[in-house]
Image (cartoon, rainbow, N blue to C red):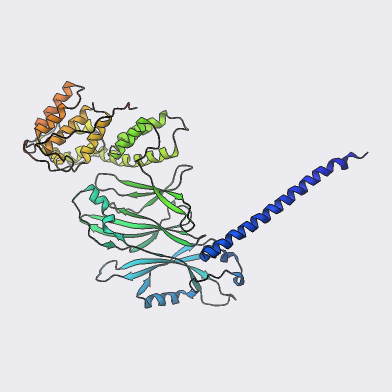
């Protein structure tokens, strides 16, 4: 009896069945893909124009209602008749490596202008169209995407300056044009990233502003994603994210000695026309339900970046790997960027004692700043003037530090000195007496420092000149927020 033939039959049947299943699955996928392309073509013909790069000339998909193929000279002539011109073109990589799209900024001349008079009012993307017989010497292009450009309001552009210096600059009721177009190439994610930009002078501070635009060659669409402003005059930059995290775009909005960085994560969203969005990284909602972590973000939002970073690093060190989430790391990175600036400022030498004290206070180095008071009367006067003219950034730090730990004597000292400089000795001493005492020696030292400040700066009948303490001298002296003491790491 020949057993082999009996045992081979099932094996042969199984492989033939698998082959049939694979064939059917492939056919089903092809049908589904064709159906999807058909729907896309019906809904938006431009969304499938990218297929033309892979089709013979005679089989290319016509774009109903689309721009007719024209030479670049014909495009420029038509624009000239409308009072418009084109800026320098940018070459964009198409879906096929051998093909290149052409980006044209459309310009309009500003009236009564002497410098940077051409404002960008529109962006257009043109795709080369090969001739049917391949013998024509003329190069035709067809517009596949266009984006109208709205100018930026001056109030948005100067907002960081107004925030940092209340009353220091009054924004005009006008719009500001974009005058330059550049690529955002360094570490940029997939697609072509563009930056429309302009600049405005605000006294001694030239402010750069702009708008981020993305071009997706597959979907053949230009999308405006984000408006930005930078008193530091810096262009937004892409930052290489940690493994598993989305790309990040960073914008420097620093004014003076107060660091201010805005960071955004590039995320997908459910939109066929605009599938990408830049989502801000916020410190308002803690990524971890941890008391010390929550305290750290509160301190960071109050400007005590270095103190906040130390707490976050401690929390991370004590947390299990699975507990420390990517969102927590993202928030910590933002805090670390600010702390890097305040630490650098505090560690470098300054000619002025007042400035040296200020950068130490900004970084939360209360004891070090207090040592600077043990100098000459001239230096003490300078520090007193600095405290008197402070618009609230130092008191905000004092309040935050005392809310976390109300027993900090060095922080109490600076709270009392701020009050003394702005309201006088009596309100300062009254406020100080209401703070918890940890050391009678430290309290006596604080009272001594109050008395040492220049008498011309410490008029006990002086009225409040800064907005951070709204009470008048006849009212109760300001109190820090109710303390919520937590155990810090």
Q: Residue at x 36, y 67 (%)?
A: 121
Quarter the C terminus occupies: top left
**Depicted 93 relative to depicted 443: above or below:** below
Q: Splitting the image into 4 quarters, where does residue 105 fall?
A: bottom left
Q: Position of residue 16 (x, y in %)?
A: 77, 49
Q: Residue at x 30, y 42 (%)?
A: 341
Asked whether the viewer can see residue 338, the reply is yes
Quarter the N terminus occupies: top right
**Depicted 174 relative to depicted 12: above or below:** below
| Left or right, 454 with reference to 313 | left
Q: Position of residue 4 (x, y in %)?
A: 87, 40
Q: Residue at x 21, y 27 (%)?
A: 409
**Depicted 326 relative to depicted 201: above or below:** above
Comparing 127 with 375, the one in front is 127
Comparing 97 with 165, the one in front is 165
Comparing 231 with 123, the one in front is 123
Q: Position of residue 364 (x, y in %)?
A: 25, 35
Residue projecting furthest to the right: 1
Comparing 282 with 41, the one in front is 41
Asked whether the viewer can see residue 371, the reply is no
Number of labels in the image equals 0
Q: Position of residue 465 (x, y in %)?
A: 12, 43
Q: Splitting the image into 4 quarters, where does residue 453 fall?
A: top left
């Amino acid at each position: 009896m020949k057993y082999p033939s009996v045992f081979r039959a099932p094996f042969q049947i199984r492989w033939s069945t698998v082959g049939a299943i694979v064939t059917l699955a492939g056919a089903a996928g092809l049908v589904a893909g064709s159906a999807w392309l058909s729907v896309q073509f019906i809904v938006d013909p431009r969304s499938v124009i990218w297929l033309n790069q892979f089709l013979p000339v005679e089989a290319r998909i016509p774009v109903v209602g689309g721009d007719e193929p024209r030479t670049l000279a014909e495009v420029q002539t038509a624009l000239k008749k409308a009072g418009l011109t084109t800026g320098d073109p940018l070459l964009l990589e198409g879906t096929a490596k051998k093909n290149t799209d052409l980006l044209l900024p459309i310009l309009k001349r500003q009236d009564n202008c002497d410098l940077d008079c051409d404002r960008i009012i529109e962006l257009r993307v043109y795709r080369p169209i090969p001739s049917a017989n391949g013998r024509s010497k003329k190069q035709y292009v067809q517009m596949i995407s266009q984006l109208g450009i709205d100018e930026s309001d001056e109030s948005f552009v100067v907002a960081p300056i107004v925030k940092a210096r209340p009353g220091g600059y009054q924004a005009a009721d006008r719009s500001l044009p974009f005058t330059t177009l550049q690529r955002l190439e360094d570490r940029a994610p997939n697609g072509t990233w563009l930056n429309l930009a302009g600049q405005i002078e605000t006294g001694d501070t030239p402010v750069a502003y702009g708008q981020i635009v993305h071009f997706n060659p597959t979907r053949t669409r230009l999308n405006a994603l984000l408006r930005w402003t930078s008193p530091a005059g810096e262009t937004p930059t892409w930052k290489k994210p940690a493994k598993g995290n989305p790309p990040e775009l960073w914008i420097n909005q620093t004014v003076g000695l107060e660091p201010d960085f805005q960071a955004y994560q590039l995320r997908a969203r459910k939109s066929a026309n605009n599938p990408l969005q830049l989502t801000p990284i916020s410190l308002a909602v803690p990524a971890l339900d941890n008391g010390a972590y929550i305290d750290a973000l509160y301190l960071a939002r109050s400007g005590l970046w270095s103190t906040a970073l130390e707490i976050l690093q401690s929390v991370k060190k004590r947390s299990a790997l699975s507990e420390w989430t990517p969102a927590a790391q993202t928030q910590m990175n933002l805090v670390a960027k600010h702390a890097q600036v305040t630490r650098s400022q505090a560690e470098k030498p300054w000619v002025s004692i007042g400035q040296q004290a200020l950068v130490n206070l900004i970084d939360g180095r209360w004891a070090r700043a207090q040592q600077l008071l043990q100098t000459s009367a001239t230096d003490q006067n300078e520090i007193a003037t600095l405290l008197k003219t402070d618009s609230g950034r130092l008191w905000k730090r004092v309040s935050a530090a005392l809310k976390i730990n109300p027993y900090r004597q060095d922080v109490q000292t600076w709270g009392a000195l701020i009050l003394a400089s702005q309201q006088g000795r009596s309100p300062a001493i009254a406020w100080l007496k209401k703070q918890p005492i940890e050391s009678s020696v430290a309290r006596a030292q604080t009272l001594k420092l109050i008395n040492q400040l220049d008498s011309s700066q410490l008029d006990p009948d002086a009225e409040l000149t800064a907005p951070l303490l709204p009470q008048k001298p006849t009212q109760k002296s300001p109190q820090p927020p109710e303390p919520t003491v937590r155990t810090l790491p």
